[in-house]
Image (cartoon, helix red, strand yellow):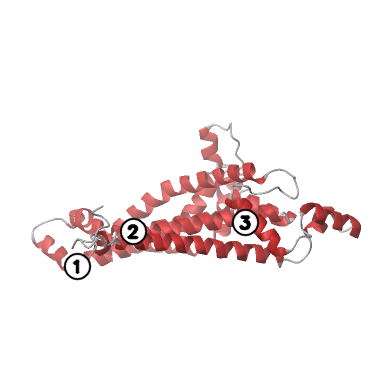
Amino acid sequence: MSLFRDSRGKGHFPLLKLISLRLLAGVAMLLVVSMLIFIGIQLLPGNAATAILGQSATPQAVAALNQQLGLDQPALSRYLSWLGGVVHGDFGQSFTSREAIAPVLLDRLANTLSLASFTAMVAVPLALVTGFISARYQGRWIDRLLNLFTRAAVSLPEFFSGYLLILVFSITLFWLPSNSSIADDMPLVDRLQAIALPCVTLIFAILGHMSNMTRAALVTAQNAAWVDTALMKGLSPSAILFRHVLPNAWGPIINVIVLNLAWLMVGVVIVENVFVYPGLGQYMVDSISKRDIPVIQDCALLLAGIYILLNLLADVVALLANPRLRHGR
């Protein structure tokens, strides 16, 4: 308990209190987001029953389907019913397939998390190495070259870089498939080949920001006076940067990595639709075109929940990286 207890023995828990407040704020934010999702979908033009039956449907058929789907109930009643079901693990039934949403939702979520995990396993080490090299050779040609590459990667929208990769590696060179459809029984090599292009697209999207922030954190830390003292003692710049500067810059670096991973869960929606990847983002976009309201609500709330959770994790990491909070001073 020494991590959370005040060093003077007063029994205070400043770090634990701050983390608890962040968690409560996250729950409140998720509740607000659920309201905004529900209200936003209700404000969409048109009617879900008409979209399902077609424009030629009679008013009687539309009214009957509205009653069958529960769309004739008051908005507040439908919101509370949906939110209560989600809290108890019941995500409802799809309007179009009339099947339970939860199994499909979890399967699509697993695919999205798999794509994001493969992206993070490549992007995070690459960003750390790029930022480290840029900070080590600050102001030299390699630093300027890496800055040019990372800034160019950040400036490209995901859909543009995705289509550019398809043009080069699928249409011109025939190296990789443009369609990233996967199956449960697909061999690992084929699965990696299928997700290669969307992974590269997502790496381009987050690499630049992570590497630039890593460089900035290292450059700021190495401007301290004790770095000059270490240089006068004969330590090499690389050894100082790796052994002494990097541990002091871990806090902001880890924070920006977690924030980019949170953004990754949102940016994957665009990439999944570019490459027809069967993930949560494509599931939601397909449901929007079909006006499948329960699926849209569940997908949006799940993505928002993951985003809020990762942002909370970034806040907790920032708190843990603060020595005054760690030692209760």
Q: Quadrant of the C terminus?
A: bottom left
Left or right, 105 with respect to 216, comes to right
Give the spatial CA distance, label 2 vs label 1. Answer: 31 Å
- Looking at the image, which residue sits at the far front? 10
Badge number at residue 146: none
Q: Secondary structure at mark 2?
A: helix
Give the spatial CA distance, label 3 vs label 1. Answer: 51 Å
Dot 1 amino acid type: Ala
Give the spatial CA distance, label 2 vs label 3. Answer: 29 Å
The part of the image, by quadrant, that contains residue 83 is: bottom right
Question: How many discs appear?
Answer: 3
- Residue 113 vertical position relative to residue 36 in the rendered view, above or below: above
Percent across and percent down for residue 228 are 14, 65
- Give 39 or 200, whichever is nearer the viewer: 39
Q: Is residue 281 visible?
A: no
Left or right, 262 with respect to 91, comes to left
Q: Is residue 198 visible?
A: yes
Q: Secondary structure at mark 3?
A: helix
Dot 3 amino acid type: Leu
Dot 2 amino acid type: Leu
Residue neighbourhood size for the residue with mark 2, other residues' Cα within 10 Å, grouped as few (<14), some (14–19), many (≥20): some
Q: Secondary structure at mark 1?
A: loop
Residue neighbourhood size for the residue with mark 1, other residues' Cα within 10 Å, grouped as few (<14), some (14–19), many (≥20): few
Percent across and percent down for residue 136 are 25, 59
* Labelled pair 2, 1 in contact (Cβ < 8 Å): no
Badge number at residue 224: 1
Q: Nearer the viewer, mark 2 or mark 1?
A: 2
- Give 158 or 98, whichever is nearer the viewer: 98
Percent across and percent down for residue 147 are 37, 63
Residue that mark 3 sits on: 83
Residue that mark 2 sits on: 16
